[in-house]
Image (cartoon, helix red, strand yellow):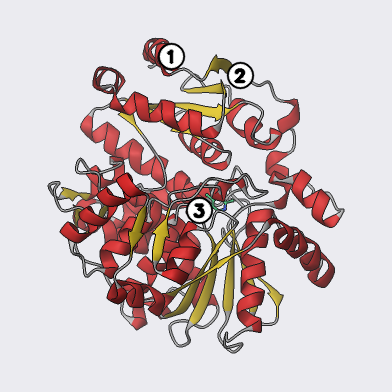
Amino acid sequence: MRYVSTRGEAPAIGFWDAVLAGLAPDGGLYVPQAWPRFTPQEIAAFAGKPYAEVAAAVIGKFAGDDIGHDELLAMTREAYATFTHPSVTPIKELYPNLFLLELFHGPTLAFKDVAMQILARLYDKALKAQERHLTIVAATSGDTGGAAVEAFRGASNARILILFPEGRISEVQRRFMTTTGEVNVANVAVQGSFDDCQAIVKDMFQDKTLRQAVDLSGVNSINWARIAAQAVYYFTSAVALGAPHRKVSFVVPTGNFGDAFAGYVAGQMGLPIETITVATNSNDIVARAIRTGRYVRGEVQATQSPAMDIQIASNFERLYFEAVGRDAAATARAFKGFGQTGSIDIPAEALDFMRQLFGGDAVDEAQTSAAIRDTLEDTGELIDPHTAVAVRAALRLRAGAGDASTPLIVLSTAHPAKFPEAVLEAAGAEPRLPAAAIGLDRKTETFDRLPADAEAVKNYLRAFAICNQNDAP
Ligand SMILES: *Cc1c(COP(=O)(O)O)cnc(C)c1O
């Protein structure tokens, strides 16, 4: 399987390079040269199979001959053994024919674990084969950092540095990152905002000397292997509800559009999906694009669902590329233009293509709180604010034109205990921490504080890399 850039000016690469790649050198995102497909019989045969087996089948389609089935299966088994639920991503009926797909039973209680656990194992194999030792740097507004640290802790060929905005993430989120006690993990509380952290990371990647000295890498949501790993639960949940003999619909709480795009990927691989509704908070760039045909950058607003507080939905470029018939020149023009003007007018035909599968809905703060409260009253379930955004959109879809005979699956992306303040305020009930997180508050934290200054962080990183080199076996 080869991977091409959405902007068409970078050479095609193989699976292992795609696993380790961030942005393509032309600024585009990698996508498979052609979509691999399952037959309806193959999809039907997923019914009742363990999650790890379906994961190996789906991810295996993207690896082609680059990894043997048994080896990949061993990796997915190990990755998903870290989840505390036997089904890994169970579904639960919330309202009649409306289901929650619980993606938060991993080590850090957020859906990012699903992709990160397998990504770390793929990284390990790729790095050992290439005899590389690299440094992962990531800025986090909360969930990505914890999932990445938990997945890469103790890795022999990778060290990881996380930057988070001091005082602006929840205590549970911080403790997942700072209590590992591993020598290959470093955390920095930056005296600034998440945007400051991101700007520092960008500065580091642009520093060629530093990039080469420590072999810098990212694990953000544009990574292809993460998308492939997220396509898996679209299959397992749909098959549990009667696919491929019956269509299902999804509602996806959306920030960077990685999770929602994974649903598109599952559809291209042969899963019959009726609709995917992209549910955003008040940072509604994607919902607005699908509704109005204009993709326009706005100001980031802080909400109760911080993992979706973004102003650019990076993975939207992949859908755009598909929607313009894989015209890389048109995609490059549109997104280079976006970099300058902050807006794209989606051509009519491309918009029609997007709307065949996708709908969009934006949910404001009051509606999010109401959804947490109403869900508890109606069903006895506590849901987190990200999930609440999607539940609200799902109920609106049902009340409107939505066909109630099609099962509607809402992706539940975080455990409510990760956002106890928002849940308590909305519903008057405090979510209980699951076993995985119990004791977190008694562990010793290790992190350093630095000003929002790229040079200071770079010096810190060099020292960390040297010290970790010496510690390496
Ligand atoms: C990252 C995240 C999202 C958004 O996912 P995207 O792939 O960026 O659209 C939603 N909910 C939670 C809890 C997250 O951590």
Ligand 1 near label 3 (Cβ, under 8 Å)?
yes
Ligand 1 near label 1 (Cβ, under 8 Å)?
no
Front-most of residues 143 and 237: 143
Image depth: mark 3 or mark 2 in front: 3
In the rendered structure, which disc, 1 or 2, sits on the residue that comes first in sequence? 2
For the question of whether residue 217 can be seen, the reply is: yes
Secondary element under disc 2, as helix, strand or loop, is loop
How dense is the environment of label 1, judged by Cα within 10 Å: few (below 14), some, or many (20 and up)? Answer: many
Q: Is residue 185 above or below residue 126?
A: above
- Residue named by callout 1: 464
How dense is the environment of label 3, judged by Cα within 10 Å: few (below 14), some, or many (20 and up)? Answer: many
Query: Label 1 sits on what residue type?
Result: Phe
Residue visible at 51% across and 83% down in the picture: 242
In the rendered structure, which disc, 3 or 2, sits on the residue that comes first in sequence? 3
Q: Is residue 270 above or below residue 371?
A: below
Residue visible at 40% across and 44% down in the picture: 119
Query: Label 2 sits on what residue type?
Result: Thr
In the rendered structure, which disc, 3 or 1, sits on the residue that comes first in sequence? 3
Q: Which mark is residue 147?
A: none
Percent position of residue 174, x then y: 63, 31
- Residue named by callout 2: 446
Using the rendered view, name the quadrant where residue 365 is placed.
bottom right
Residues at marks 1 and 2, CA–CA distance in whole angstroms: 13 Å
Query: Label 3 sits on what residue type?
Result: Gly
